[in-house]
Amino acid sequence: MATLVHTLADHSDDVNYCAFSSSCLATCSLDKTIRVYSLANFTELPYSPLRGHTYAVHCCCFSPSGHLLASCSTDGTTRVWDTRDGRMLVALEQPGGSPVRVCRFSPQATRLVSGAADGSVVLWNMQSLMLYRSGNVKDGSLVACAFSPNGNIFVTGSSCGDLTIWDDKMRCLYNEKAHDLGVTCCDISSQPIFDGEHGFRYFQMASCGQDNQIKLWLISLTDFLGVELKYKCTLNGHSAPVLASVSCLNFLQMTTGNILHTLSQHTRYVTTCAFAPHSSLLATGSMDKTVSIWQFDLKQPCAANTVENESKVAVEAWSEDDVSAWLCAQDLADFVGLFKRNNIDGKELLHLTKESLANELKIESLGLRSKVLQKIEELRMKVISASVTAPDEFLCPITRELMKDPVIAADGYSYEKDAIEKWISNKRRSSPMTNLPLPTLVLTPNRTLKMAIGRWLETQQKHSHTA
């Protein structure tokens, strides 16, 4: 199920964290350094190790594009590095100078969050590299953080055991006592679940704790500002505090909670683990000063069928197997053999046209060509919306997603038609934006906005073809 393929032993002290981009692995340590490796051959990049922190480095993370790397330290700073040449771009000082334990980029990389030992949490503006908003949890140190896939909310975990949900304006939306002895980490799945019957949207989240447990949760978005954290189940199997999300010692099947496999390589506590986003690699870091790289096979669909939240860089990095998994997920499994014979990887997939499907791949049926092309166009649109920040007026205030069929409600705001209809069908007669009563439930198509969104999408698609 999992094979050890490489061991990195360059750090001179405990490894605290590891993180993947589509092409690199970053590790950080008590030895004050961050090391960056190429996934092609696991060799250290020329500019590595990154030095600048004056005390232990607790966490590191890549931006979605992989062009930026953030690291945070006991020295009270969160530093941002350019991964193309290793330059340090900025050292962001935590208010009060408290040791910074965790940092995370938002999915659009417009924000960076940092959490510290004094309970302070800061949102940094990545355009200006300045403080945007800050807040505090009521008790404990901040040790964990995770963003929702759309970036509208994020969750922090504290050493006193609380999980706190914040919005992107740093308003505290919900707080829950999750682990009696303290939270150690948390992570949110990339795929939302929509409850069509009730109009709710859920995100699945896992949290780990000093109580030896992994807990699964559902974050429900019940209305425009209504957020709730619902306990789902507990996964047992560890005999000591769980220090890394989706445990690096036990593979756990999320549908049943059963242990699938146990990895035994490190000689001391395992402190961190990370799955590579577009390959079957797992990295585990330990107090034994090493990082183990594992090749695994969970006999489950490849990450390619979660493309709704992938960037252009990520899709272009897909292998032929990733494309095959994507075809299966789109009910196009009959074309797997054809695409493999023609060596269609992610980059080639994005550039397929009606002509190339007919003339080069020899798909004779007009109906089948149209079906394949439609799925490719949908993928391109998802790539564009994931890799480029759309103007705020193009996003539905309820779903915060790009609108396809915008309508104007009686409050004067435009919404995605399905979203506002679900809102109204749940017997809500108030505006999602103002919370005031709607004088009428009539919805008027906003054709002008629809055309503007269409033109913007066409422009982005042209840029993606020429990039």
Image (cartoon, helix red, strand yellow):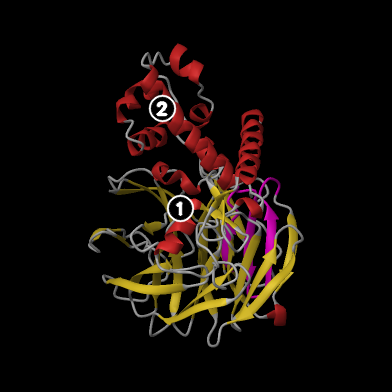
> Could you tell which of marks 1 and 2 lies nearer the N-terminus?
2
Q: Is residue 150 visible?
A: yes
Write the start and end of the magenta stretch as one range: 58-85
Image location (x, y in percent) of residue 190: 44, 55
Q: Residue at x 47, y 68 (%)?
A: 223
Q: Main secondary structure of the magenta part?
A: strand
Looking at the picture, tell me which residue is in the foreground, 108 or 313.
108
Looking at the image, residue 386 sits to the left or right of residue 180; the answer is right
Query: Alpha carbon of mark 1 to alpha carbon of mark 2: how far?
Result: 26 Å
Reply above or below: 184 against 2.
below
Q: Is residue 188 visible?
A: no
Q: Residue at x 65, y 53 (%)?
A: 393
Residue ID for mark 1: 418
Q: Quadrant of residue 311?
A: top right
Amino acid carrying label 2: it is Val
Numbered disc in front, either 1 or 2:
1
Looking at the image, residue 374 sits to the left or right of residue 126; the answer is left
Q: Quadrant of residue 343?
A: top left
* Residue 405 included in the magenta stretch of the image: no
Q: Residue at x 36, y 64 (%)?
A: 198
Q: Residue at x 31, y 30 (%)?
A: 333
Amino acid carrying label 1: it is Asp
Looking at the picture, tell me which residue is in the foreground, 272 or 110.
110
Q: Check disc 1 and report its element: helix, strand or loop.
A: helix
On residue 372, which mark appears? 2
Looking at the image, residue 322 sits to the left or right of residue 309; the answer is left
Q: Quadrant of residue 218?
A: bottom left
Reply above or below: 48 against 340.
below
On residue 306, which mark appears? none
Image location (x, y in percent) of residue 128: 77, 60
Image location (x, y in percent) of residue 170: 62, 73
| Neighbourhood count class around disc 2 (C-alpha, 10 Å): few under 14, some 14–19, many 20 upward | many
